[in-house]
Image (cartoon, rainbow, N blue to C red):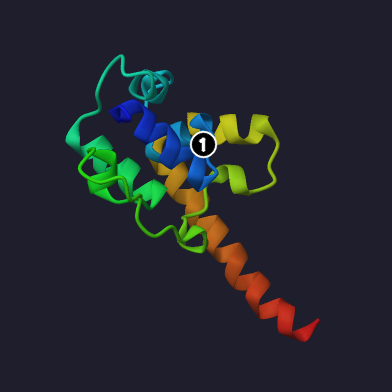
Amino acid sequence: MLTFGERLRMARERSGLTQLEVYRTIKLSNKSLSRYENNATSPDPGTIKALIELYDVSADFIMGISDNMGHFQPRNRKPTINDAVLPDDTIQKLIQLSAEAKKKVVEYIDLLKVVEDVKLPHE
């Protein structure tokens, strides 16, 4: 029988995510996921829920109730910052911004997207 940690690792690997991508996506501390996958510690219920949603896996599988992982739909996976082609120093700069500055970055990205959408059909 698979352990809780082994089930987490299997679900993460099936979803094609690295531990670093998971850390960044659901904002875990640096070593938490490794500890969960190695059965050294257990996540709180909120983290379990976030992992289940991120991995697109059944809660019954993660909790050891079923061996069926559930339907996997990679096209529905939310994109992460790692899906973008950005230099590592840019990502680090974004992480270090204040909440207000991050909000402005998101607003600017939204504005750029609108401008790009308007330009594309005319080019």
Which quarter of the rendered picture does the C terminus lie within?
bottom right
- Residue at numbered disc 1: 21
Q: Position of residue 115 (x, y in %)?
A: 64, 71
Asked whether, in this view, residue 27 is left or right of residue 18, the answer is left
Q: Residue at x 43, y 48 (%)?
A: 103
Asked whether, in this view, residue 26 is left or right of residue 120, the answer is left
Q: Measured along the vertical axis of the image, is residue 15 above or below residue 87?
A: below
Q: Residue at x 36, y 21 (%)?
A: 32
* Amino acid type, callout 1: Glu
Asked whether, in this view, residue 11 is left or right of residue 63, the answer is right
Tag 1 secondary structure: helix
Residue 27 visible somewhere in the drawing? no
Q: Measured along the vertical axis of the image, is residue 68 above or below residue 73?
A: above
In the picture as drawn, the residue positioned furthest to the top comes out as 40
- Crowding at mark 1 (Cα within 10 Å: few <14, some 14-19, many 20+): some
Q: Position of residue 94 (x, y in %)?
A: 54, 36
Q: Residue at x 68, y 42 (%)?
A: 86
Return the residue nearer the eye: 50 or 61: 61
Q: Quadrant of residue 61?
A: top left
